[in-house]
Image (cartoon, rainbow, N blue to C red):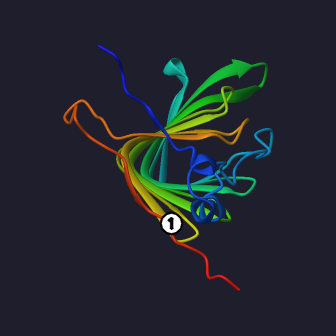
């Protein structure tokens, strides 16, 4: 079975849409080497399994990126004295905010060394007023490429939908 992936390649659409949606995330070039700051109501450290679980109004910041969720599990490896974050799993009312876009979903995974953020479940991307809806969004922080898929395990026939603002002609 061929998996149909719908790529958001806005630049190939109409010129008006190309202005409204560049097809490249504002997170392209995000300093993924910047510190990751975490703030939450509670933390549980599971050192034996190399995990830290943050719960209650979790706020994670890295450079120009802010992630909010109800619960975030951080998986890490030990590199000498300091743990190195490998993956962040966010669950519950997930919201990702950059200077020009906001994405909401039911869950998200940030593959820190892979520089990929995958958001799943009722995903809504709002980029300067233009909105896309789908079930799975992948943000490649290295290239800035954004891809959307409308399908999910529960909805094999799902589609991506959107509304794009047309700028005023001067």
Q: Is residue 125 left or right of residue 10?
A: left
State the residue lying farthest toward the bottom: 170
The residue at the point 52 percent across, 44 percent down is: 8
Residue 27, above or below 53: below
The residue at the point 66 percent across, 26 percent down is: 114
Q: Is residue 33 left or right of residue 94?
A: right
**Residue that mark 1 sits on:** 130
How many callouts does the rendering have?
1
Which x, y percent locates residue 135? 34, 43
Q: Is residue 105 left or right of residue 154?
A: right
Nearer to the camera, 27 or 81: 27
Which x, y percent locates residue 113? 69, 26
Q: Quadrant of the N terminus?
A: top left
Nearer to the camera, 27 or 109: 27
Q: What crowding class fits label 1: few (fewer than 14 Cα within 10 Å), some (14-19), or many (20 or more)?
A: some
The residue at the point 24 percent across, 29 percent down is: 153
Which x, y percent locates residue 62? 70, 50
Tell me if residue 95 can be seen: yes
Tell me if residue 41 can be seen: no
Q: Quadrant of residue 64?
A: bottom right
State the residue lying farthest toward the top: 1
Q: Quadrant of residue 115?
A: top right
Identify the element where label 1 is drawn: strand
Which x, y percent locates residue 170? 71, 86
Nearer to the camera, 21 or 31: 21
């Amino acid at each position: 079975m061929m998996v149909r992936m719908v790529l958001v390649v806005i630049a190939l659409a109409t010129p008006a849409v190309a202005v409204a949606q560049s097809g490249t995330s504002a997170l392209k070039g995000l300093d993924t080497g910047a510190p990751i700051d975490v703030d939450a109501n509670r933390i549980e450290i599971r050192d034996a399994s190399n995990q830290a679980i943050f719960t209650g109004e979790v706020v994670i910041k890295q450079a120009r990126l802010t992630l909010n969720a109800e619960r975030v599990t951080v998986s890490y490896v030990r590199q000498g004295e300091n743990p190195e974050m490998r993956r962040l799993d966010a669950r519950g009312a997930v919201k990702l905010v950059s200077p020009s876009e906001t994405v909401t979903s039911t869950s998200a995974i940030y593959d820190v060394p892979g520089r990929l953020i995958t958001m799943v479940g009722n995903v809504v991307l709002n980029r300067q007023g233009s909105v896309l809806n789908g079930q799975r969004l992948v943000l490649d922080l290295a290239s800035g490429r954004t891809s959307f898929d409308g399908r999910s395990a529960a909805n094999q026939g799902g589609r991506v939908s959107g509304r794009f603002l047309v700028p005023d002609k001067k």
